[in-house]
C-alpha cells in the first residue's frame, strides 16, 4: 500500500495539506457568498436612495409651506389680539363716558316721576 511506505510525519503533512486545502476552499466559498450579499446590499441601498431623495425634497417643500402658513397664522393671531385689545379699550371708554350721564338721567327721571305723582295726589281728601 502507498501509505505503508510513508512515515508518520509524511502522513501528518499530507493530512495537514488536505485540511488546509479544505479550509481555503471553505473560505473561498464564504468570501464569494459575502461578495454576493454585499452586492445585493449595495443595490438595495441604491434603490432606497433613489426613492428617498425625491421624498426628502417633497418633505422640505411641505415644511416650507407649513412654515409660511404658521407665519401667516401668527400675523392673524396678532391682529386678533390687537382687535380684542381695541374693543376692550373702547368698551371701557364707553362705560366711563356713558355711565355717569345715564345714572344722572335715571335719577332725574325718577325724581321727575316722584314729583309728578306728588302733584297728582289729592290733598286733603280732594280729588
Image (cartoon, helix red, strand yellow):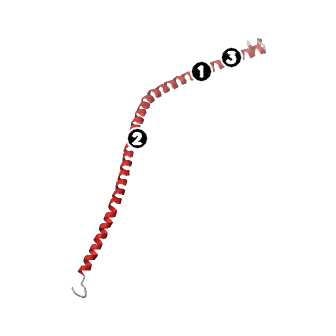
Instruction: Count how many numbered circles sit on residues in the image.
Output: 3
Name the mark on residue 31. Answer: 1
Disc 2 versus disc 3: nearer the observer? 2
Query: Marks 1 and 3: in contact by CB < 8 Å?
Result: no
Where is residue 44 drawn, in percent x and y? 49, 27
Disc 2 versus disc 1: nearer the observer? 2
Q: Earlier in the sequence, mark 3 or mark 1?
A: 3
Disc 3 versus disc 1: nearer the observer? 1
Q: Is residue 4 left or right of residue 23?
A: right
Q: Earlier in the sequence, mark 2 or mark 1?
A: 1
Where is residue 106 drawn, in percent x and y? 30, 68
Q: Nearer the viewer, residue 115 or 80?
A: 115
Residue 1 lies in what quarter of the image?
top right
Q: Residue at x 29, y 70 (%)?
A: 108
Residue at disc 1, secondary structure: helix
According to the picture, the residue beneath numbered tag 3 turns out to be 18
Classify 77 as above or below 64.
below
Classify 61 as above or below 100.
above
Name the mark on residue 67. Answer: none
Q: Earlier in the sequence, mark 2 or mark 3?
A: 3
Q: Residue at x 35, y 59 (%)?
A: 96
Distance from disc 3 to disc 1, alpha carbons, whole Å, reads 20 Å
Classify 106 as above or below 56.
below
Residue at disc 2, secondary structure: helix
Where is residue 95 drawn, in percent x and y? 35, 59
Classed neighbour count for the residue bearing mark 3: other residues with Cα under 10 Å, few (<14), some (14–19), many (≥20):
few
Classify 101 as above or below 39.
below
Residue 31 lies in what quarter of the image?
top right
According to the picture, the residue beneath numbered tag 2 turns out to be 70
Amino acid at each position: 500500500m502507498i501509505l505503508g511506505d510513508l512515515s508518520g510525519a509524511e502522513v501528518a503533512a499530507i493530512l495537514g495539506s488536505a485540511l488546509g486545502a479544505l479550509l481555503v476552499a471553505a473560505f473561498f466559498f464564504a468570501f464569494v457568498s459575502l461578495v454576493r450579499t454585499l452586492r445585493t446590499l449595495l443595490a438595495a441601498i441604491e434603490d432606497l436612495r433613489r426613492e428617498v431623495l425625491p421624498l426628502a425634497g417633497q418633505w422640505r417643500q411641505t415644511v416650507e409651506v407649513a412654515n409660511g402658513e404658521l407665519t401667516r397664522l401668527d400675523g392673524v393671531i396678532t391682529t386678533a389680539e390687537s382687535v380684542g385689545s381695541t374693543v376692550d379699550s373702547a368698551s371701557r371708554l364707553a362705560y366711563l363716558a356713558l355711565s355717569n350721564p345715564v345714572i344722572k338721567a335715571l335719577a332725574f327721571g325718577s325724581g321727575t316721576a316722584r314729583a309728578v305723582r306728588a302733584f297728582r295726589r289729592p290733598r286733603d281728601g280732594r280729588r
